[in-house]
Amino acid sequence: MSTQTDPQTLARATALGIGARISLHPHCDDYVEVITSALAAADPSRVEVRTDDVSTLLRGTEHDVLRFVHEVLAAAGETRWHVVAHVQLSRGCPGEVSCELPDDALLEAVDVPELLPTGLPASAHWALYPLDDTGGDHLAHIMNAVAAAGARATTTPEHFVTRLDGDLADVLTAVATGWLEAARYVRHVVAHVTVSMHSPSAGAR
């Protein structure tokens, strides 16, 4: 059973730009019910959740944010409708509106959380953005992240993105692995992923 994150931990995560935005797009007439039910199925006790007419903002620790995203997408996927989700993950400054991370500081390294298999096949287009202002090798960080992600999901190079295929949990774990791997060396890392489940064109590649 989940316990609520203490306010000090949540405030620190917010100040350091750790969080996500998620948008669900179910392809069905009853899309409102699918979206609201999926959001309600996730445990909100460990994250700050704020939904507007564009997306849902999540703020909290890396583990708590990733688990919330996993729970929302799993609930949406269980409807068996074609569902597309856009997820943006941010870690480090200037990811937040205001930031308390010094210009020369890195956040502490974080291990990837364990996400339980769902039995839901998922495909995704994933892009990683190591926003390094110090003149580092951006491509090296991206390639290392893609290699690390390949240990959890099938990776295929595509135009402007890396394609990921596998169980929903493995796809999200691959995204998280790359995101947190790059963050070991870069102050601000953003990952963007578009996830598709139950697409009618899934076998047409």
Image (cartoon, rainbow, N blue to C red):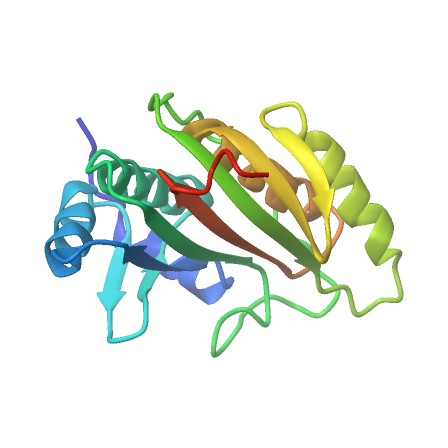
Quadrant in the rendering for residue 94 = bottom right
Residue 130 pos. (x, y %): 71, 58
Measured along the vertical axis of the image, is residue 117 above or below residue 32? above
Q: Please report the residue visible at 33 percent of the width from the left and 24 percent of the height from the top.
A: 118
Residue 78 visible in the displayed image: yes
Quadrant in the rendering for residue 153 = top right
Say left or right for 39 vs 169: left
Quadrant in the rendering for residue 120 = top left
Q: Please report the residue visible at 31 percent of the width from the left and 58 percent of the height from the top.
A: 25
Residue 109 visible in the displayed image: no
Q: Please report the residue visible at 68 percent of the width from the left and 28 percent of the height from the top.
A: 150
Quadrant of the snapshot with the C terminus: top right
The image shows a total of numbered marks equal to: 0
Quadrant of the snapshot with the N terminus: top left
Residue 13 pos. (x, y %): 43, 56
Say left or right for 164 vs 133: left
Measured along the vertical axis of the image, is residue 125 above or below residue 15? above
Residue 114 pos. (x, y %): 44, 25
Viewer-nearest residue: 193 or 135: 193
Question: Residue furthest toward the front?
Answer: 204
Say left or right for 173 vs 37: right
Measured along the vertical axis of the image, is residue 119 above or below residue 105? above
Residue 20 pos. (x, y %): 42, 58
